[in-house]
């Protein structure tokens, strides 16, 4: 079965950017806020909170903030994986990217390319790790996806990107169908709570840290502060500061640090 038509609203989109979430093999609430489509560890496809059309150019209002400076006209697809991963020395972490996710991701992107008439080129179908080099938009050292945990012989952003584009084109040529996607049911839980923590960067000049969601202000966080995100709901993220202080901040002033 193909992706539901309601997941593919009419819009002019120019590219698809592939990510990993930096979390567990299940889509978290924060993942659904930042990406249009998320592929879980078993290949199940989850829809993000915001429609693809929210990122059409020019962007107005809320949108899926998946790639720094490159969200306009860009569809964000992410593979739920790589919690605790390190680029050097190479360590795939507690939830490595799976071959099932990779294959499902290629078929999903093929479906998006058909729907939105996006050609499969390095400029229009690329990973987050390729954005800086290919499009010239600085990405603060992002390396998703520059390694394949299920095939260690493949590494390097462009090498991995070329393999993904070949797989997307193969899916287009073969017109293979996607497995039936399912909607998430409530808040997703991972077996390891620590693995579900995601990192985010403060984008506001100064961000209020609050005791509760929309509660009393207990601190100020300057732009660039890196926070551990413990949970997210209704526009608020529960975070832990570098000093270990717990509190809540407005999610719209955070960007994922994948």
Image (cartoon, rainbow, N blue to C red):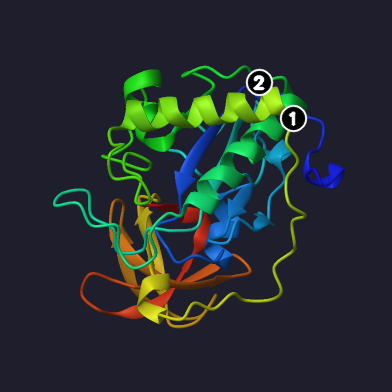
At a point 80% along the width and 43% down the height, the residue shown is 2
Q: Position of residue 93 (x, y in %)?
A: 30, 63
Q: Which residue is mark 2?
A: 118
In the drawing, what numbered circle is on residue 140? none
Q: Is residue 252 left or right of residue 37?
A: left
At a point 48% along the width and 50% down the height, the residue shown is 99
Q: Is residue 242 left or right of residue 147?
A: left
User: What number of labels is visible?
Assistant: 2
**In this rendering, the label closer to the viewer, 2 or 1:** 1
Label 1 neighbourhood size at 10 Å, few (<14), some (14-19), many (20+)? few
Q: Which residue is mark 1?
A: 175
At a point 50% along the width and 44% down the height, the residue shown is 66
Which of these two is toward me, 90 or 75?
90
Q: Is residue 158 visible?
A: yes
Q: Position of residue 81 (x, y in %)?
A: 44, 58
Label 2 neighbourhood size at 10 Å, few (<14), some (14-19), many (20+)? some
Q: Position of residue 153 (x, y in %)?
A: 27, 39
Vertical side of 237 occupied by 17: above or below: above
Q: Which residue appears farthest toward the left when viewing the image? A: 89
């Amino acid at each position: 079965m193909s992706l539901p038509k309601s997941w593919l609203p009419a819009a002019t989109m120019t590219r698809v950017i592939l990510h990993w979430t930096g979390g567990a093999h299940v889509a978290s609430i924060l993942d659904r806020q930042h990406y249009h489509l998320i592929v879980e560890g078993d290949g199940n496809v989850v829809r993000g909170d915001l429609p693809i059309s929210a990122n059409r150019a020019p962007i107005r209002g809320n949108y899926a903030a998946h790639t720094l400076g490159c969200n306009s006209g860009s569809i964000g697809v992410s593979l739920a994986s790589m919690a605790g991963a390190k680029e050097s020395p190479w360590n795939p972490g507690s939830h490595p990217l799976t071959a099932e996710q990779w294959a499902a991701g290629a078929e999903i992107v093929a479906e998006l390319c058909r729907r939105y008439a996006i050609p499969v080129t390095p400029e229009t179908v690329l990973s987050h790790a390729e954005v800086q080099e290919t499009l010239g938009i600085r990405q603060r050292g992002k390396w998703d996806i520059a390694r394949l945990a299920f095939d260690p012989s493949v590494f390097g952003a462009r090498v991995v990107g070329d393999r993904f584009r070949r797989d997307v084109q193969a899916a287009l040529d073969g017109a293979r169908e996607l497995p039936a996607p399912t909607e998430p049911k409530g808040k997703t839980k991972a077996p390891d709570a620590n693995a579900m923590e995601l990192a985010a960067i403060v984008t506001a000049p100064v961000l209020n840290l609050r005791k509760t969601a929309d509660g009393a202000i207990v601190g100020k966080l300057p732009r660039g502060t890196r926070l551990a995100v413990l949970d997210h709901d209704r526009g608020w993220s529960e975070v832990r500061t570098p000093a270990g202080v717990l509190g809540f901040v407005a999610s719209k002033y955070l960007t994922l640090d994948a």
